[in-house]
Image (cartoon, rainbow, N blue to C red):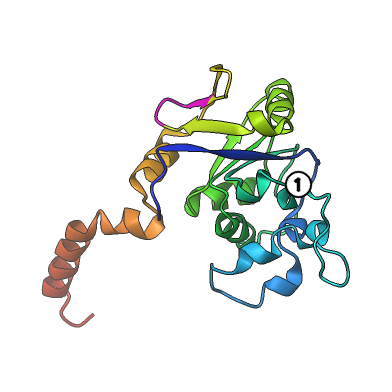
Amino acid sequence: MEKFTTLTGIAAHLPMINVDTDMIIPKQYLKTIKRTGLGEGLFAELRYDEAGEKLPDFVLHQAPYTEAKILIAGDNFGCGSSREHAPWALLDFGFRCIVAPSFADIFYNNCFKNGILPIVLPQAEIDKLIDDASRGDNARLTIDLEAQEIRGPDGGAIPFDVDPHRKRCLIEGLDDIGLTLEKAEAIEAFEQQNAASRPWA
């Protein structure tokens, strides 16, 4: 998993509540188990018309948001089914951080497992970030995970909370496999001891 320490990038705004995982990545894109190529289907029903043509009014089709790495979203983001394709699609598009007043629990957990930092902030702070993001020139933010701060173009900083274990995993680029491999020596020692004491097993 790619490490996350400090991220500076364009913040796109999607001030909609209850954006579910089917809206993030519609069901027709779930036929693959690959994590690449899903960015094209991200928010497909909002981005394209029935003929597959781009809807120019959608934020991700407007400069500078075509290069967005941060998404400022509405309440209860990622609700609905537990499909892990949702964070895969966001990551494949280029998003590494989602900021919202609240997240659905499973989606929130899946973000950390895939190298995306979900940040929960009060609605008043979200409104300020959406206002900044909607002004093209002010759309660039810096997410400093080590300092647990969001810094805007005006020099202001917004602190945020994050679980210490999840913070460490993101900073060190450790997914569940990486965490297991940290204990490789202990696992190998156990296997050798077990084989010696239970040769029939």
Q: Nearer the viewer, residue 193 or 17?
A: 17
**Residue marked by disc 1:** 59
Q: Secondary structure at mark 1?
A: helix
Residue 46 is left or right of residue 72, and the answer is: right
| Dominant SS type (magenta) | loop
Residue 83, image x, y percentages = 65, 62
Residues shaded magenta: 146-150
Residue 138 is left or right of residue 96, and the answer is: right
Q: Which residue does the image show at 41% across and 33% down from the upper left?
A: 164
Q: Which residue does the image show at 74% across and 74% down from the upper left?
A: 28
Q: Which residue does the image show at 50% across and 32% down from the upper left?
A: 143
Residue 193, image x, y percentages = 13, 66
Query: What's under tag 1, amino acid-wise?
Result: Val
Give residue 190's quadrant in the image.
bottom left
Q: Nearer the viewer, residue 122 or 14?
A: 14
Residue 99, image x, y percentages = 63, 36
Is 148 contained in the magenta span?
A: yes
Residue 137 is left or right of residue 94, and the answer is: right
Quarter of the image with the C terminus in it: bottom left
